[in-house]
Structure formats: C-alpha cells, structure tokens
Image (cartoon, grey):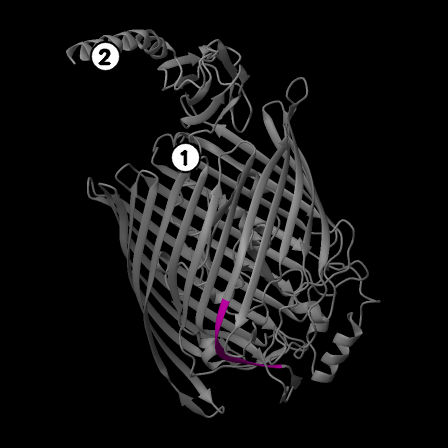
Amino acid sequence: MKKKQIHRSILLALMLLVAQPSRLLAQSLPAPLLEDAEQDCGLTISGKVLDHDTREALIGATVYIPELDRAAVTDAYGNYHLHQLCRGTYTLQVTYIGYETERFSVKLTSSATRDLQLHSDARVLRTVEVTGEHLREQAQTQQTLSGRELEQTRGLALAETLKGIAGVTSLQTGPTISKPVIHGLHSNRVLILNNGVRQEGQQWGAEHAPEIDPFVASEVKVIKGAAGVRYGADAIGGVVLVEPKPLPKTPGISGDLHLLGSTNNRQLATSATVEGNLKQIPPLSWRLQGTLRKAGNAKTPDYYLENTGLEEKNFSAAIGYSKEKYGAELFFSHFGTKLGVLRESHIGNVQDLLYAIERGRPSNADNAEFSYSINRPYQDVQHDLLKARGYWQLGEAGKLEFVYGWQRNLREEYDMRRRVSQLPTLQLTLNTHTTEAIFEHEPLGNFTGSVGVSTIYQKNTYQYSDFLPYFTGTTAGIFATEKWQKGRLQLEAGLRYDYKYLQVKKLENNRDLIQPEYEFNNISGTFGAMYDVGYHLTFGLSATSAWRAPGANELFSEGVHHSAATYEEGNPALRSEQAYNLEFSVDYFSNPRLNGSLSLYHNYIRDYIYLAPQPEPVLTIRGAFPAFAYTQANATLTGADLSLDYKIATGLMLESKTSLLYARNHSTDDYLIYMPSNRFDNSLRYEFGQSGNGGKFSDAYVSVGGLYVAEQKRVPTKSEQDFAPAPEGYFLLQAEAGTTVHFGKQPVEIGITGNNLLNTVYRDYLNKLRYYADEPGRLFMLRIRVPFSFSKN
C-alpha cells in the first residue's frame, strides 16, 4: 500500500514538471488569452489619429493599450504604430489636449490599419470661442442677429429684420407696416425692449408697427416662448431685445455711414452714427445717430399699390460716464414716421368689400402710377424715449442697477372720410413711466442670481374719436431668479409676482360717464435645465408660465377702427390670459462642418383673447363695416423650429430653416384663426475670403436661396370663418452678394440683395391687405456702409 502511494506521488510530480514549461510560456506571451497553441505574436496595428470634424491629422496624440500597458505617439503626419501584438481583443485609448478621450475596441486576427477620430472637447472650446452663446443665460431657445447677419437686413423694418430667425414671421398691413410674430403670437404678447426699456406704444393694433429704428441696434436677440419672470407680464409669446453697442471706452472719434437704395418702391435711406471718448476724461463717452428713409408706391408684378409710401425721420443721442465701481448713462431717441395705407383697403360697406375680394385687384390698379405722395388714408406716428441708467458695484456683495424710462407715443390716423379737413380721424396719446431696480449677487458657490422690482405707470388720452377710452394703469412687480451650475449640468428657477390696476373713463351711449376699475394679479414661474453631453451637443428643457391682463382696447374699444377699416367691440368681462409653455431643445454647436438647433414647444393658453369675425356687419352713419368682437378661448400652440448650417466644402455653406406650427381653439373645437403657416427657408452661400494682390477685396460672398411658405389649410371651418379663403402657398427665389473694398486703409462694405427674383404673384395669409391686392414683386436693394475712425493718441 505504501509503495502504491509512493508511485502515485512520483507520477504526479512528473506530470507537474512536464506542465510547468507550457504554463511559463503562456504567462510570457503579450496577449489576453490564447485562442490556440500556435498563437501569432508578430502582428501590427497602425493608422492615423484625426479630428472628427475637419479630418486633419493630430500630431502628438497618445494611443494606449491598457491590457499591455504599452503606448505609441503619433508622428508629424498623425500616424501611430504598435508592433509585436498577439491575436486577441484590445482597447485603444486615445488622448490629445483639447479633445475628448476616446476608447476603441479592436479584435486583432492579423495586422490591421485603423484610423481613430477624436471629437473636440466642447468645454475647452467654449472658454475661447463661444462663451454665453451656447451655454445660454436661460434654458429657453434664443437666437441673436449681429455682425454681418444683421448688416444684411439694414433698410428693413424691425419685423422684417427678424424674419430670418426660425419661428419668427411678421403680421403685415401692406408693404410698409409689419410687426413681429413669435410662435404665432404678436402685439401685446410679444414684449420689445429698446435699449433696456419696455417699448410702450399702441402695440395692440395689428396694423401698428413698432416705433423702433433698427439702425440703432448692433444686436437683436429673440427669446422664444413665455418669459414673464424676468421681463414681466405680457411676455407670453416671447421677447425681442434691441441693443445698441456699448459706448466707446478708447479715446477718439469713430462711426459709420449707411447708404441704401432699392428698386420696386424706390426707397432711399441713409443713417449715420458718430461716437467718441474724451482723452481728458476717459470715463466719459457719447454717441449721436440719425436716420432718414423715404419710399414710394410699391409695385406688384402687375400693378402699383397706390398710396403705400413711407417717410421716416429718426435720431438718438447717448452720453455715459463709466467707472469700475459705478457709472451712469442717459439716452434719448425720437422716432417719426408717416405711413401710407392702400386706398382700396378703406371700403365703406360690406357689398363693396365683397366686390373687392371677388375682383382680386384694386379698382384703380390699371391707372395707378409710381408716386412718393402720401395721402389719406395714412398714419402719422411720433415716439419719444428717454432712458436714465445707473449702476453701483457693491464690492463682494454684487451689483445694483437702476433704470428709469419715459415714453410718449402720439398716434394720428387719417381715414378717407375727412378729405376736406386737415384733422385726423383719431388721435391717441400715451405717456408711460417705467422703473426697474435689479440686484445681482456675486457667485455663492455654484449659485448666481438676481432679485428685482419694477413699476409701470401709463396714461392714455384721445381726441376726435372715442374708439379707445381714457385710461390710467399702474403695474408693480417683484421677481427673483437663481441659477446653479456644476460640471455639465445647469439648473435655473425663477418666480415673479405682478399686480396691475386699471381705471377707465368712458362715455356710455355718448351720455353717461362710467369709470370702471379693474385689479389683476398673478404669479409667473420658470424652471429650466441644460446638460452638456459633450461632442458639441447640449440638451435643454424649460417649463415656464406667464400671464397677461386684458388691455383697455380689449375691454372697451367700440366703433370703427379706421386704420383697419373694421368695426371692433370690446368685452368688459374679459379675464386674464394664463400661458404655460413647455420646450425641449437640442443644440449642436462649435463644429467646423455641421451646426444646428432644434426646439419643440407646446404652449397652452387659458382664456386666450382674440378678435373673432362676426357673421353680420355693423351699420354706422359712415356705412357698413365688417364686424369683429373680442372673445376668449382655451388654445394650444404646438410647433417645431429647426436651423441647420452645413459646410459642404471650403467656403461653401448650406443654411436651412424650418418653422412648423399647429394651433387649436379648444373652446370651438376648431383651428385657431390667423396663425402663421409652415415655412421652409434654404440657401447656399459661398464665401471667397481674401482676394487680390494687395488685399483690395475681403469678406466676399454670394448666396442664392428659396423660401417656401405652405398654404394655411388649418383655418376655422365650424365658426369664425374668414372673409376670404387662405391664399395658396408660394415660393420666392432670393439672392445676395457682398464684399468689403479697401481703398488704402479705408474699408467700404457693399452688398446687394434680391427678393422675389422670379417676380412671383402671391399673397401672404398674415397680410391684412391680401383681401384686395397681391404682394410686391421683384426687388433689389443696394447697401453701402462706410466705417470711419479718428483716433487720438
């Protein structure tokens, strides 16, 4: 028995001795696991490390295999080589400064070539290139026009300037009157801030254009969706921020001169800016600016639109004193315009209205000629704005800022029925005083934020017509916003309370004076989140609420609205509107090849106030007029905005914008009336860059594109039907070209724009004159800008 145990022990020892060399050999092989006894360990993997977007080679990138603890560095051509590898599965970990660390899994069965692509680290890029543009101040979608993009719109009204932004269009009354529409909402639901002051005029009218000179602005920003927390009640549809450039801080005098001319309506315009800083008093700066515009009758492809000219005279002045810890600024502007209204749009009775719609063109179209003359009917509007601003740095506590604004809006409307009189048919004077005080605290850990209070006092008077009553209104609000940011995540929240008091004085039945009083108050809130996932990609989500009290016109207007040629009736029982807006957005940015943004929104408005067409006209001593009455309904507006820029090749760019909107009236179980139709805008741009031996030309570009606006088929069919069906969809061919010419050290920027190049006959659903006439035909606009500078050493 003992011998058997000894033999077994000897046999086991021999077996272990034989197995030991193979175990030692296996441990010495540089591969994860052997697949067979004859493993090949002379394999090579090689390739290039490239920028994912530009496909440029990255020199000095590190390619590391953690399983083997071996690495290689790319050479001057971006090539890497790893030799003496066995068959197996490996991880290639690639690192390079300014780029995200990437990991690639490779199954190696034979020598192979594998190119490795790295994405730029968006967080690193933002520190040098896009601060504040892609890490937005708030989660809501916003877009800014500045630089060359804004310069290309010079000579257009503010609403026309903004039409290049997805989700923004315009509500028009002929070729000279337009106002911005954001996600289907306009007038009192879109708040405009002119140099930091709420623009307050008679903006309730669909044919009342904003009294703002776009030449003042160096930047125009649009915030889409309800923004009532920061900007106050009424901002249900969005906010338009019109901002001039900061006053100069270096000694010397500089400025620019704009010259414009266009065909079709033969517009001539000039605008000049002069600004300076005093060497003897460096904190003191100043600016003067003025604009003149004149245009005559616009022309459709077949006939002139009689009495559609405009005249405009604007000027502004600013002076500022700025120190590190405190400063002050004073700004004044005057906007004056005279706007002709198509004569055939003022019709005395419903039968003539039906004839005009059926005729399809103005009755005097065959005899109409070009003229700069502006006769009745027309509007004469004057708007003055005075702003005073001061700020004070409170050390480590933060910054305190105070803004006071005074505005006087004088609107005169001249109809067709007082030709022998020089007096207007309606005169409205609105005086507004606004104040705002904001305290921005210094960062507390990951928190930044502000608190503020604001007030508005208004007084409206009238003459010649009591269409709109006397009223005084007082609004007071208090708000707080806070932002938390850590790593790639940013959260924000805000709350605001507003109180509004309105007193109206009105003669009832032209006999009894009534003085109803209204009090409205409500809370607005916002919550948003943004997350930077890397690879140039950011996601945003925002939930906001805002409210709007009914205006005096919605409550008590009664009679013929002359500039609209309609009979309108208010409703004293209207309640406040309450909007709840939900938005999801995706931004793909800082990519040399592809950039874009997508936003999906859903806006629910409880007690939405609108003018509903009435089935029967109203007979007055001046004739019968189409009737409209203010009413309320629960409504939803759902849509999507998409903007894309794709670099096809060096200098060649494809730009695409899409706006979709679906609006529903839940109280009538029908579509919501007067909503924008779907729009698709695409263009190709080619940039030449620098040319010429001496660099005589620079920044040259040419673009061609097309705008397609679909027919609005989502119109009410059960009730509140329009006077004429929605027009057909249309396509417009557009083109632009421009360059900067250098005369020695003096640059001169030249650009030409062509609209409706095919001279297409069309009508737009949101143009109130579509009942009577076509839109303007082919138009070319020439722009010249001459910057100048006289520096003082």
Question: Is residue 662 positioned above or below 215 on the image?
Answer: below
Q: Earlier in the sequence, mark 1 or mark 2?
A: 2
**Is most of the magenta stretch helix, strand or loop?**
strand
Q: Nearer the viewer, residue 166 or 350?
A: 166
Which residue is farthest front?
1
The residue under label 2 is 8
Q: Where residue 388 appears, x then y in whole percent?
A: 35, 52
Q: Is residue 554 left or right of residue 444?
A: right
Q: Is residue 727 left or right of residue 250?
A: right
Quarter of the image for residue 28 reads top left
Could one spot residue 731 in this view of the protein? yes
Q: Where residue 418 appears, x then y in whole percent?
A: 65, 78
Q: Nearer the viewer, residue 566 or 659?
A: 659
Q: Quadrant of the C terminus?
A: top left
Mark 2 falls on what kind of element? helix
Q: Is residue 111 left or right of residue 12?
A: right
The residue under label 1 is 277
Q: Quadrant of the N terminus?
A: top left
Q: Amino acid at mark 1?
A: Asn
Q: Report the mark closest to the observer, 1 or 2.
A: 2
Q: Nearer the viewer, residue 432 or 671?
A: 671
Could one spot residue 342 in this view of the protein? no
Question: Is residue 62 positioned above or below 358 on the image?
Answer: above
Q: Where residue 496 appears, x then y in whole percent?
A: 30, 62
Q: Residue at x 46, y 64 (%)?
A: 603
Q: Is residue 629 magenta?
A: yes
Residue range highlighted in magenta: 627-636
Q: Amino acid at mark 2?
A: Arg
User: So how many labels did they put on this image?
Assistant: 2
Q: Residue at x 42, y 83 (%)?
A: 573
Q: Is residue 262 left or right of residue 603?
A: right
Quarter of the image for residue 381 reads bottom right
